[in-house]
Image (tube, rainbow, N blue to C red):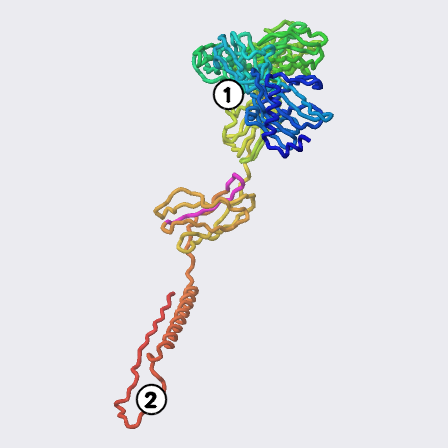
């Protein structure tokens, strides 16, 4: 076979065959044989950088395969590769096509180059029916190039609103046709496709603020599709006219309102790129810089015109907006309700003055709502068929108050009936008629009528007063006070009759012992207006509450006069109880007798002696005869014989009636005293006793001797104890009692003897 022979032939043989085959096609046209099949051209596409496999038809196993390439625009084929099945050869020029290799009879092009565009010819030599035959395959290779990443270019990245901008989508390479698409994404938001824009460039004319944002384009062909990075179009504009908002929001015809003492936030927004710079003015005075102005605690002084100035620093343009801010404040306190009676109707008044704006008031009654008005409102409501306890409510509403303010009026009938009384004024020159009927809403109306039922003066609410000139002919006259109330029929009334006072005394004659206590009682009977009670003493002098010795004790219609420590000289006599009012007076007399106690028995001094050192005396006495007594009185004075003679003075007065002796001290030894004693029966003193001078007490030596002896014995005992103690401590001082011993051989004249010691003990006794 040719293949087997080829293995033993040099490579030059293959090249020769190769050249021969090429020679057959040197003209570009094959020389077909009668058995050669018809030729057809196959179109193949490849992508640059990719790989493609060119098949060389089908048929019996080839003896030889030869691939050639004719570039576009050329007629000369160039050998690429040849193989006989056992070995293959790729020409060096094939590197311009890419990485070329053979797979059986197919030509494989890897890492495809654009230079591979052109016509490929595959020539096959094979044996059929014992003869050599040649087959041809024609292929046209188209190399496609992917589009490169597009890039967006803007003619002016920062145009001023109203200018013209051209956007271009640039692609470096890519096999035509290339299709373009555009997308726009705002600075804050999602992207949106620009429908209808398929060209590599488009124009924004004029550009406006809605065009601000990111622009992206995409390019695509039959190979791929790529998108560009975004290009930002920064449209310069503004500032627009500022828009002012407020929190919490309160709108008026002029601008905004806010409640007093609440936090207020004013915000200003003016569309601008770059963002605006803001300045706040209040009444043409700068108060803040920045888009937000916060009033922490709004007050009435914050009411005014607020202007927001907005400035674009890039364009140096300015705009402004002014609004009116009004600080609302409610009226002080709460609404006040009042009711006034009128004929067959009730007039309801509700007032709540002040505030900005004025509060809105509305009445509401048992039968439904009533009228409404600002600040104050009056409602006249028919009184017919209104029961006692009917409630009327006035509601006050104000924008600065969340809950409404209320005041209520409840109509109710006063209890009971009118009460009449009279009093005297201006020292009984006038009589004041008073009438009261408290309670009720509205208050009752009262008025005085004379005996002919003619009105005296005008009428008044709750209490009526009428003054009369005081005169005696008013006694016995009757006056009427009539009360009217819209919820009471018929009209109640009370009567008052003027009359002079009358008196009664408990006892016309009262007796009391001297020094005792007496009570005179006087009672008032009748009298309109109320009378004044007083007591006159025996000398017709008025007894006042502070008069010494007297006590006034009023008890209702009684006036009791108390007399203390009754004295015949001052308190005995006739007392008068006097009652006076503006229409008359009366009096009653009471006789007071002050009786003395019986004289006590006489007293005699039985003993009067001095004590030690003459500074006290011992007094003893005795009673002479019968009689009542309550105590004793001892008097003393300096005796006429002494240098201090004088009047009698009390030495002791608090002596019990059972006592018969008393020690009296406090005497001056240099004064000679005289004493006397009297018996007492309450305030009555008996005859003084005889006058005596104290005597010295009798002398007694026995106590003195006993005292002196006792004192001497004590002194001697103490002295003896001291001597014995001394002798025990110093024995060599005293002489010895034993006989001295004579030593033989010594001279008696030379013997030593102790010298005697003299001790003297003196004992003194003091009487």
- Whether 252 is drawn above or below 622: the answer is above
257 vs 1, left or right, is: left
- Let me know if residue 266 appears in the view: no
Which of 601 and 523 lies nearest the eye of the viewer?
523
Classify residue 637 by image quadrant: top left
Which of 686 and 176 lies nearest the eye of the viewer?
176
The location of residue 351, given as percent across then percent down, is 58, 11
Give the label on residue 740, or none: 2
Classify residue 528 by image quadrant: top right
Determine which residue is flagged by label 1: 296
Magenta segment: does it hold 684?
Answer: yes
The location of residue 545, given as percent across then percent down, is 52, 27
CA–CA distance in space, label 1 to label 2: 131 Å
Q: Earlier in the sequence, mark 1 or mark 2?
A: 1
Magenta part, dominant SS: strand
Which residue is at a point 47% across and 13% down the rendered structure image?
A: 310
The location of residue 385, given as percent across then percent down, is 72, 9
């Amino acid at each position: 076979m040719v293949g087997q022979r080829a293995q033993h032939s040099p490579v030059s043989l293959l090249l020769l065959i190769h050249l021969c085959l090429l020679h057959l096609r040197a003209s570009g046209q094959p020389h077909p044989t009668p058995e050669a099949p018809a030729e057809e051209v196959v179109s193949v596409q490849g992508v640059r950088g990719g790989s493609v496999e060119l098949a060389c038809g089908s048929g019996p196993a080839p003896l030889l395969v030869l691939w050639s390439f004719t570039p576009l625009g050329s007629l000369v084929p160039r050998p690429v590769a040849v193989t006989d099945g056992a070995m293959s050869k790729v020409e060096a020029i094939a590197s311009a096509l890419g990485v070329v290799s053979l797979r059986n009879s197919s030509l494989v092009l890897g890492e495809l180059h654009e230079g591979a565009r052109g016509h490929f010819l595959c020539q096959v030599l094979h044996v059929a029916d014992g003869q050599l035959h040649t087959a041809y395959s024609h292929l046209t290779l188209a190399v496609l190039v992917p589009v490169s990443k597009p890039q967006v270019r803007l003619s002016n990245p920062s145009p001023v609103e109203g200018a013209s901008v051209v956007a271009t989508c640039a692609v470096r390479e890519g096999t035509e046709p290339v299709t373009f698409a555009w997308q726009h994404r705002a600075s804050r938001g999602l992207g949106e496709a620009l429908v209808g824009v398929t060209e590599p460039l488009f124009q924004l004319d004029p550009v406006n603020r809605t065009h601000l944002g990111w622009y992206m384009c995409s390019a695509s062909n039959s190979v791929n599709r790529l998108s560009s990075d975004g290009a930002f179009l920064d449209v310069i504009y503004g500032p627009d006219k500022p828009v002012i908002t407020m929190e919490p929001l309160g709108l008026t015809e002029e601008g905004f309102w806010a409640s007093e003492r609440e936090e207020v936030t004013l915000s200003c927004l003016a569309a601008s790129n770059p963002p605006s710079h803001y300045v706040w003015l209040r009444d043409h005075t700068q108060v803040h810089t920045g888009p937000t102005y916060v009033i922490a605690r709004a007050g009435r002084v914050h009411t005014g015109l607020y202007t927001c100035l907005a400035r674009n620093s890039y364009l140096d343009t300015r705009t402004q907006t002014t609004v009116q801010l009004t600080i609302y404040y409610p009226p002080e306190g709460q609404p006040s309700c009042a009711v006034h009676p009128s004929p067959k109707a009730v007039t309801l008044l509700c007032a709540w003055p002040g505030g900005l704006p004025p509060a809105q008031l509305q009445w509401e009654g048992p039968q439904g709502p009533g009228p409404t008005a600002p600040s104050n409102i009056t409602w006249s409501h028919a009184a017919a068929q209104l029961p006692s306890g009917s409630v009327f409510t006035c509601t006050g509403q104000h924008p600065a108050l969340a809950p409404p303010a209320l005041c209520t009026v409840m109509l109710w009938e006063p209890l009971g009936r009118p009460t009449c009384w009279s009093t005297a004024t201006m020292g009984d020159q006038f009589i004041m008629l008073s009438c009261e009927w408290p309670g009720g809403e509205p208050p009752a109306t009262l008025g005085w009528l004379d005996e002919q039922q003619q009105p005296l003066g005008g009428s008044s609410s709750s209490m009526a007063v009428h003054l009369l000139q005081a005169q005696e002919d008013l006694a016995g006259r009757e006056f009427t006070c009539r009360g009217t109330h819209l919820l009471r029929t018929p009209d109640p009334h009370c009567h008052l009759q003027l009359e002079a006072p009358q008196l009664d005394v408990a006892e016309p004659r009262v007796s009391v012992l001297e020094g005792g206590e007496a009570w005179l009682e006087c009672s008032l009977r009748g009298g309109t207006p109320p009378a004044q009670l007083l007591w006159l003493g025996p000398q017709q002098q008025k007894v006042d509450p502070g008069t010494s010795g007297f006590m006034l004790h009023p008890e209702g219609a009684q006036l009791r006069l108390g007399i203390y420590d009754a004295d015949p000289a001052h308190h005995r006599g006739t007392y008068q109880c006097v009652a006076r009012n503006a229409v008359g007076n009366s009096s009653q007399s009471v006789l007071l007798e002050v009786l003395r106690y019986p004289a006590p028995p006489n007293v005699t001094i039985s003993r009067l002696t001095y004590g030690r050192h003459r500074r006290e005396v011992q007094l003893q006495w005795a009673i002479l005869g019968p009689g009542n007594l309550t105590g004793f009185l001892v008097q003393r004075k300096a005796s006429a014989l002494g240098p201090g003679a004088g009047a009698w003075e009390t030495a002791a007065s608090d002596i019990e009636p059972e006592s018969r002796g008393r020690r009296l001290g406090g005497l001056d030894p240099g004064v000679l005293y005289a004493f006397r004693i009297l018996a007492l029966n309450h305030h009555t003193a008996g005859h003084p006793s005889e006058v005596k001078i104290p005597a010295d007490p009798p002398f007694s030596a026995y106590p003195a001797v006993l005292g002196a002896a006792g004192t001497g014995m004590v002194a001697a005992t103490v002295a003896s104890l001291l001597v014995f103690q001394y002798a025990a401590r110093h024995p060599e001082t005293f002489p010895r009692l034993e006989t001295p011993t004579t030593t033989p051989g010594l001279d008696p004249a030379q013997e030593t003897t102790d010298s005697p010691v003299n001790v003297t003990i003196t004992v003194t006794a003091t009487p």
